[in-house]
Image (cartoon, rainbow, N blue to C red):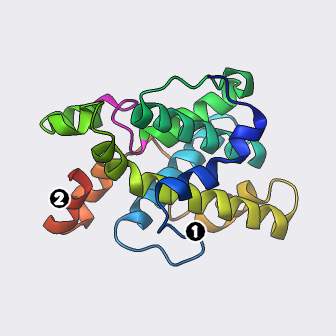
Amino acid sequence: MEVSAYNLKKVPRMIKRMYPHLNERSSPDGIVPIFLSTIEGNILFVIDSHNKECKSSSIDTALRIACYKVFSHIEALDYDTSVHENEVINDFVHAILYAFDPFTNETLMGMLKDSPDLFAKDDREVLKKYYESGFDAILRILFSLEVRDDMYGYNGYVKFLDREFRGNLSAEKLNYVTMIASSSLSEEERAELLN
């Protein structure tokens, strides 16, 4: 199925339909802040690798395409987003998904390979549960992107990330949640990531 620009704009609604309890305006709790910092650190990595010639609109498009890539795993459908893609957007999509998607990140897949239920395509609910925190983080980043562009003008989100988070987020390499989580989470929170 080809994804139109209209379909891309509907991503937040689709996420909320799948997870009605998510609210991008509330304070993140549990493991969601780790997902947020990992994804935003990966976004900074791509910005740096493209010599800061990236636009907020490219990040917005990439976040929405990343959601469609995950929807394809959950729904076992093929979504064609190629009309919206270019080199920079593809780099952002890869970096976003690398943070939490085992189908993008082979290391993460290796860590989760002992969870056969997770990869049983016919069990949609297990995949939905696995991806919930990732979708929550993406929903929050989409909201932040809109707010920052309104606050800071053109490319506001990129300026915001650079100004506010440059010292706090690792942008030296692509990271993923379990790498960061291994040192900062309790056993219970670690188990929640894998269950």
Q: Amino acid at mark 2?
A: Ala
- 103 inside magenta stretch: yes
Count residues near mark 1 (Cα–Cα under 10 Å), then give few for <14, some for 14-19, many for 20+. some
- Indicate which disc, 1 or 2, sits on the residue closer to the N terminus: 1
Report which residue position mark 2 lands on: 191
Image x and y of residue 65, in percent: 61, 36
| Residue to which mark 1 is pinned | 24
Quadrant holding the N terminus: top right
Would residue 48 be visible to someone looking at this image? no
Q: Farthest bottom residue?
A: 27
- Whether 6 is drawn above or below 160: the answer is above
Q: Are marks 1 and 2 in contact (CB under 8 Å)?
A: no
Of residue 138 and residue 9, the one placed in the foreground of this image is: 9
Image coordinates for residue 29, horizontal then vertical, percent? 40, 74
Instruction: Using residue 159 as the reference point, say whether residue 92 is left or right of it.
Output: left
Element type where label 2 sits in the image: helix
* Residue drawn where x is 74% and y is 31% of the image: 4
